[in-house]
Image: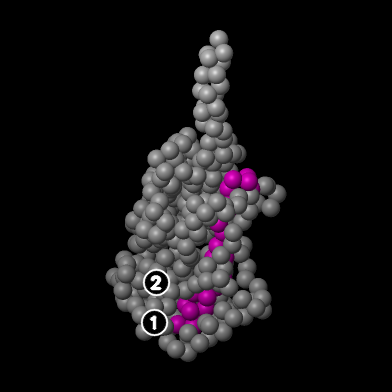
């Protein structure tokens, strides 16, 4: 009897550690895995999704992580994709790429409190609390858009520039109105034409519509168009090539899409933000329930100025825009967002 009790105690001793809280940072193979759910347009959009992909690729190379991604369709597919990763014990951090994920990722984060989440371009609502396991990655697109607006206002020959947006929404409106403000800051007499591809997420993946809107603006005298429209913007670049006019890219440096026709791009360090969150989770320093903001001061947003395009921006324009940058950082310029 005593022998049996002794054996039972030994068995319980070795079983107790396995009954503790499960570590969700690494799976049972010792691998750290990231789940990435792309925005409308998916991988290959030459914009925000591709920037996020570069971030996880960098993490794979430098931090030794593994990752998987899902390219959902419209509507409920986004929630289903987030839920699919959330139900897996081998996923350590889940990203939603794009403002369109805000509601779904908030809901899922509340349902899975032991999982960690991050959302690029999360729409912050001051009246709502961000779940403690979710970090909102916010970019001051208005600062970068104001700068490229100033470039367009200084460089236009026709005194008429354009804007092409994807889905008509508060976020894309922020790009639009801050671009307009930048143009008017340096050129009060410049006319600005505005066009949107639609009112649903599909408006971010319609190059044909982007080309149609851009051709209309170019034919109406516009000589520079700034787009904030995802894959739809590839149609804007095609129109620029056909008409021998100019465009400004968005999110990533899009110069390679139409060399010689893209003056610059309003760039966001989406890749850096994704990499840093992965590193925080891996290091055990991740903190949710907060907004992490990236602006001009930290080079979270900027305009592209590299060997590929610097010959397209005159030095006097560069000098003026750099002065405006300093004024924005110093708080001397208030930029509208709506």
Q: Is residue 85 left or right of residue 128?
A: left
Residue 78's tag is none
Residue 86 percent across, percent down from the top left: 49, 38
In front here: 282 or 228? 282
Would residue 58 be counted in the magenta stretch?
no
As displayed, is residue 224 above or below residue 99? below
Residue drawn at the location 55% of the way across and 56% of the way down: 137
In front here: 29 or 228? 29
Of tags 1 and 2, the one toward the viewer is 1
Residue located farthest toward the front when viewing the structure as drawn: 2
Residue drawn at the location 52% of the way across and 82% of the way down: 321
Per the image, the residue denoted by label 2 is 247
On the image, which quarter does residue 264 sit in? bottom left
Residue 116 percent across, percent down from the top left: 54, 45
**Other residues around mark 1 within 10 Å, as few (<14) / some (14–19) / many (≥20):** some
Q: Across the whole image, how many numbered discs are drawn on residues?
A: 2
Residue located farthest toward the left when viewing the structure as drawn: 242
Q: Quadrant of the C terminus?
A: bottom right
Q: Quadrant of the N terminus?
A: top right
Q: Is residue 164 left or right of residue 21?
A: left
On the image, which quarter does residue 70 sit in? top left
**Other residues around mark 2 within 10 Å, as few (<14) / some (14–19) / many (≥20):** many
Mark 2 element type? strand
Would residue 133 be counted in the magenta stretch?
yes
Q: Earlier in the sequence, mark 1 or mark 2?
A: 2
Residue located farthest toward the right when viewing the structure as drawn: 127
As displayed, is residue 142 above or below residue 244? above
Residue 304 percent across, percent down from the top left: 43, 74
Span highlighted in magenta in the image: 130-155
Mark 1 element type? helix
Residue 310's tag is 1
């Amino acid at each position: 009897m005593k022998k049996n009790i002794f054996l039972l105690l030994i068995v319980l001793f070795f079983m107790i550690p396995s009954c503790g809280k499960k570590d969700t940072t690494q799976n049972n193979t010792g691998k750290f895995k990231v789940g990435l759910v792309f925005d409308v347009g998916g991988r290959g959009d030459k914009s925000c999704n591709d920037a996020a992909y570069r971030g996880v690729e960098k993490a794979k190379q430098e931090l030794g992580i593994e990752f998987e991604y899902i390219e959902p369709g419209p509507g409920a597919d986004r929630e289903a994709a987030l839920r699919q990763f959330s139900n897996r014990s081998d996923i350590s951090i889940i990203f939603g790429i794009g403002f369109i994920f805000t509601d779904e990722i908030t809901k899922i984060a509340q349902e899975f409190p032991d999982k960690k989440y991050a959302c690029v371009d999360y729409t912050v609502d001051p009246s709502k609390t961000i779940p403690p396991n979710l970090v909102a990655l916010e970019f001051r697109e208005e600062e970068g858009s104001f700068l490229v607006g100033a470039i367009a206002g200084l460089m236009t020959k026709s005194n008429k520039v354009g804007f092409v947006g994807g889905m008509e929404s508060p976020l894309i409106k922020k790009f639009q109105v801050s671009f307009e403000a930048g143009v008017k800051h340096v050129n009060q007499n410049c006319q600005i034409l505005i066009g949107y591809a639609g009112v649903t997420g599909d408006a971010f993946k319609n190059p044909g519509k982007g080309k149609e809107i851009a051709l209309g603006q170019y034919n109406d005298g516009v000589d520079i168009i700034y787009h904030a429209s995802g894959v739809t913007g590839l149609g804007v670049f095609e129109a620029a090539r056909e008409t021998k006019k100019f465009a400004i890219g968005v999110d990533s440096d899009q110069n390679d899409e139409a060399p010689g026709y893209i003056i610059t791009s309003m760039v966001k360090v989406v890749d850096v933000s994704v990499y840093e969150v992965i590193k925080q989770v891996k290091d055990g320093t991740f903190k949710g329930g907060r907004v992490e903001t990236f602006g001009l001061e930290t080079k979270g947003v900027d305009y592209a100025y590299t060997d590929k395009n610097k010959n397209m921006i005159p030095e006097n324009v560069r000098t003026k825009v750099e002065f405006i940058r300093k004024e924005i950082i110093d708080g001397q310029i208030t930029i509208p967002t709506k």
